[in-house]
Image: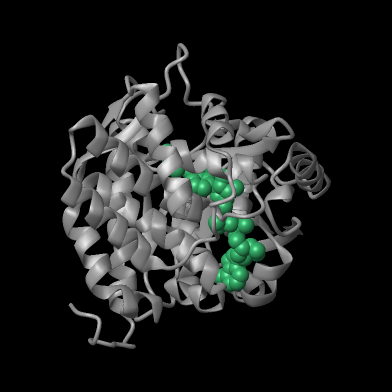
């Protein structure tokens, strides 16, 4: 498929299975999927579930709240709704407490459930509440940002932030299903879409060279939200995430590769107080940096690192980081929750499509490469 093949015909849709034994579930992807959410909810919550609590935020609710409620009513559910604030600050224990109270007041029972309608903030918070309310109730993910559709809604990581750090309080709790409607991305701000695209490219670099090439060849069509390339992109990313999670649900080994670009990315977010860069944008810088570290170690050719830089830069511009202090960025990396026994793991490509985990990088290589990144951008 190339970028000139504009096609507005809805695709048939795709289903990706996350095989996790009795916690297995399906990700349904397709234009118009939102209208079919009632049938999916009936299947995953079962014939006896009478009520569902929708958790969303005011922005997403304004666009999609009514159509989701209507679709759920059509298959016999009564719904109650709680709207959390918009933005990362809402992903807190305080918000979780308000939602727990709401569920208790509305007498939501164990065999009923939660529907998370929104981006990663809503999904992580709603998932955390579902993991903890009455020792765990089922929840259905309806992700509405590209990042949530290809990453956060799949795999069962749920969390809220502590004032001392992001995602420090959480639990693994798999959803009972994920419904992805690419049409909802039409209302997503372009910068949020771009942030998700860095994470999409990440999957290509860690596992699937063809995917990285597909993104590069079809970027214009994907950005125009042409149905076929967009649905294919989302499905392929979900398949890769499903494969990795199925092999290593609790991040004992393989799942760490999903953190490609995140060691430096998290540090850039932290030193800019989580205000300047979207998470995906920080990961974009982190991917370029990790590729250069790999070249410095002699495990990736300079030509491959350059391709990774080009493919990352094609996605769009990120806020500048030229004013940052390299020493502060390195200090922030040392606080990363991935540090184990004082060693900082990096996910490093050996070719586009393959990565290794290394925690033995010479400090001088890290320093030089971060300084170079900051000078350049
Ligand atoms: P977000 O949830 O804050 O959404 C971004 C913005 O887009 C918000 O203002 C939101 O209201 C708006 N929005 C959402 N859908 C929209 C739509 N269809 N139309 C218009 N506006 C819309 O941000 P995000 O990037 O989706 O998620 C970030 C969060 O995800 C972070 O908290 C991060 O820690 C978490 N995350 C979790 C995992 C995981 O595995 N659980 C993985 C990656 C990221
Ligand atoms: N976003 C990384 C993971 O789900 O493991």
Q: Is residue 376 above or below residue 135?
A: below
Q: Residue at x 33, y 70 (%)?
A: 231
Please identify the quarter of the rendering in which residue 8 is found.
Answer: bottom left
Residue sitting nearer the eye, 128 or 138:
128
In x, y percent, where is residue 223?
A: 39, 76
Asked if residue 72 shows in the view, the reply is no
- Please tell me in which quadrant of the rendered image residue 198 appears: bottom left
Number of labelled discs?
Answer: 0
Question: Looking at this view, is 263 or 25 the one in front?
Answer: 263
Is the image coloured rainbow, by chain, by secondary structure, or in one colour?
A: one colour
Q: Residue at x 47, y 14 (%)?
A: 342
Residue 17 horizontal/vertical position (percent): 30, 50
Placement of 23 over or under 288, stated as above or below: above
Residue 230 versus residue 329 in the image, above or below: below
Residue found at x 53% / y 68%: 191
x and y, in percent, of residue 1 in the image: 18, 77
Name the residue nearer the viewer: 81 or 281: 281
Residue occupying the far top of the picture: 341
Among the 4 quarters of the image, the one containing residue 66 = bottom right
């Amino acid at each position: 498929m190339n970028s000139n093949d504009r096609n507005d015909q809805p695709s048939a849709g795709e289903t990706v299975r996350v095989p996790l034994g009795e916690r297995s579930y399906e990700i349904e992807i397709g234009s118009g999927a939102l209208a079919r959410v009632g049938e999916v909810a009936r299947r995953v919550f079962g014939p006896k579930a009478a009520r569902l609590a929708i958790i969303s935020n005011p922005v997403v609710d304004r666009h999609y709240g009514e159509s989701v409620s209507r679709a759920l009513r059509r298959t016999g559910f009564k719904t109650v709704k709680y709207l959390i604030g918009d933005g990362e600050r809402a992903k807190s224990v305080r918000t979780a407490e308000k939602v727990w109270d709401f569920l208790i007041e509305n007498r939501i029972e164990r065999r009923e459930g939660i529907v998370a309608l929104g981006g990663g903030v809503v999904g992580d918070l709603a998932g955390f509440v579902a993991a903890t309310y009455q020792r765990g109730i089922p929840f259905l993910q309806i992700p509405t940002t590209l990042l949530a559709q290809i990453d956060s809604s799949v795999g069962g990581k749920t969390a809220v932030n502590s004032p001392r750090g992001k995602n420090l309080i959480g639990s693994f709790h798999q959803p009972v299903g994920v419904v992805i409607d690419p049409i909802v991305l039409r209302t997503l701000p372009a910068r949020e879409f771009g942030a998700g695209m860095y994470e999409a490219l990440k999957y290509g670099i860690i596992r699937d060279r063809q995917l990285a090439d597909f993104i590069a060849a079809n970027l214009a069509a994907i950005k125009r939200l042409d149905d076929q390339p967009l649905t294919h992109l989302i499905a392929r990313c979900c398949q890769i995430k499903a494969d990795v999670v199925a092999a290593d649900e609790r991040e004992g080994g393989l799942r760490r590769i999903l953190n490609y670009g995140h060691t430096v990315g998290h540090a850039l977010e932290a030193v800019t107080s989580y205000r300047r860069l979207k998470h995906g944008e920080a990961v974009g810088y982190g991917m370029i940096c990790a590729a250069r570290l790999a070249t410095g170690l002699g495990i990736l050719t300079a030509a491959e690192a350059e391709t990774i830089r080009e493919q990352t830069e094609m996605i769009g511009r990120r806020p500048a980081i030229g004013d940052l202090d390299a020493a502060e960025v390195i200090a922030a990396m040392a606080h990363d929750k991935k540090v184990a026994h004082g060693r900082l793991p990096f996910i490093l490509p050996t070719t586009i499509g393959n990565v290794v985990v290394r925690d033995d990088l010479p400090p001088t290589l890290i320093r030089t490469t971060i300084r170079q990144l900051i000078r350049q951008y």
